[in-house]
Image: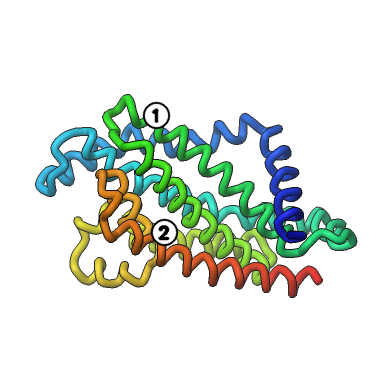
Amino acid sequence: MKVLRDTWLIFRHETEVMARNPGLIALTLAQPIAYLVFFAPFLKAAMATRGVDDYGDAYAVYVPGLFVAMGLFGGLYAGYGLLSSLRAGVIDRCRVTPVSRTGLVLGRALMHVALLEFQATVITLAALPLGLRVSPLDLAVSYALLSLVILLSISVSYGIAMLVRNENSLGTLINTVGQPVSLLAGAVIPLALAPLWVQDVSRWNPFAWATDGLRALFTGGFTDPAVWQGALVMVAACAVSVGWSVRLFNREVS
């Protein structure tokens, strides 16, 4: 119970701090909105031979991929905030309080999850007039799966941040690792357009399973095996990565 209470306290504090910067929140939406408007029409033409007949089909393929890209990169950059708090002494001041170390990590991570979920909601609303069609139930499940994508990338970012303890090194690692992981997840360009060996390699990428699950939901396939398979893979990957990052955090700040 103490961990849950402390997680909630940290989450509420971090959310209030973020809410004081509405301009920053709006700015982070500029890139996904631009991709939504300008890139999806290219996808309609590229996948015309694979059953994508209209803009509704194109957005049903593209929006889930955009969710994964947002969750992946938005989460990976969360490590900057942790390093900033460490450098400003915020974490050190928290250390002298009885707040749970695990709550410190989870509360901050869940704030980023909430922020990116808000962005996903805005993207969904923006895509509806463009032709996107998705049922409320499938959308709710897709948001739950997206939360796992975000939590996985945040915990990986926190773990790397605790290891390198340097913004420049963290940025280099994010750019080096994030791009190939995104491509192998089929986030921007569906893996159906990739050669077979790339599809085989992508099976080792948990984000690829999440992308498949999200696309199945957006095409009306709630009972599609890709949904539960993606959820199962992401739950397992999140459990490992969150445990790893919390352990590193406890070791470094204790």
Q: Give the farthest residue toward the right.
A: 96
What residue is at 63 percent from the left and 68 percent from the top? 245
Q: Which residue is mark 1?
A: 126
- Quarter of the image where the C terminus is located: bottom right
Tell which residue pokes out farthest to the left in this image: 49
- Identify the element where label 1 is drawn: helix
The answer to whether 227 appears left or right of 28 in the picture is: left
Q: Residue furthest top?
A: 129
Q: Nearer the viewer, residue 251 or 173?
A: 251
Residue 176 at what x, y percent from top left?
47, 64
Query: Can you tell which mark lies on residue 179?
Result: 2
Give percent across and percent down for residue 172. 54, 62
State the separation of the CA atoms marked 1 and 2. 25 Å
Kind of residue at badge 1:
Ala
Q: Amino acid at mark 2?
A: Gln
Q: Residue at x 57, y 58 (%)?
A: 154
Residue 182: x and y, percent? 39, 58
Secondary structure state at the residue bearing disc 2: helix
Q: Is residue 192 above or below residue 202?
A: above
In front here: 221 or 249? Answer: 221
